[in-house]
Amino acid sequence: QVQLVESGGGLVQAGGSLRLSCAASGSIFSINAMGWYRQAPGKQRELVARITSDGSTAFAESMKGRFTISRDNAKGTYLQMTALKPEDTAVYYCNAWVQPLPNMETGEYWGQGTQVTVSS
């Protein structure tokens, strides 16, 4: 069983910053890409940023220059968000492609989400 647990969400004023953390645990042989998605009320879930096992990153256009993503060898990923805007308000989900055991296929896993609210 693979678990992803997010932390770091909260309420912040426009222009402020937040750092989200995601920790992976459980049966993990290897982790390929990790990333962050978000879903605002009434909208579809969208990619925020992702990072591969070799450190390559990709960002949604509206986050470029404001958000950075990183990961560590301890099965974690972090999303540093700066210059936050009210439209960044959403539930942020951690995502990871994990191979649980050497003889198992890589699968996609999700965290439970953490709320980020940006006030104007």
Image (cartoon, rainbow, N blue to C red):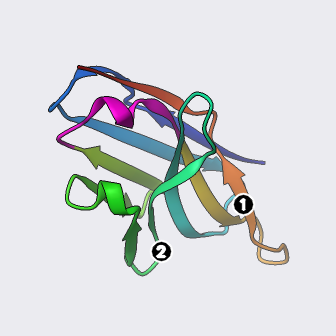
Residue 52: mark in rendering: 2
> How far across and how far down the image is residue 87, in percent?
36, 34
Measure how far apart labels 1 and 2 are at the Cα level. 14 Å
- The span picked out in magenta is 82-92
Q: Tell whether 29 sits left or right of 116.
A: right
Q: Residue at x 41, y 64 (%)?
A: 73
Residue lying at 19% horizontally and 43% vertically, measured from the top left: 82
Q: Which mark is residue 53?
A: none
Q: Position of residue 68 (x, y in %)?
A: 27, 57
Q: Position of residue 114 (x, y in %)?
A: 50, 29
Query: Which badge, 1 or 2, is on the more N-terminal residue?
Result: 2
| Magenta run includes residue 64 | no
Where residue 14 sits in the image (x, y, percent)?
A: 20, 27
The answer to whether 63 appears left or right of 96 in the picture is left
The disc at residue 108 is: 1
Amino acid at circle 2: Thr
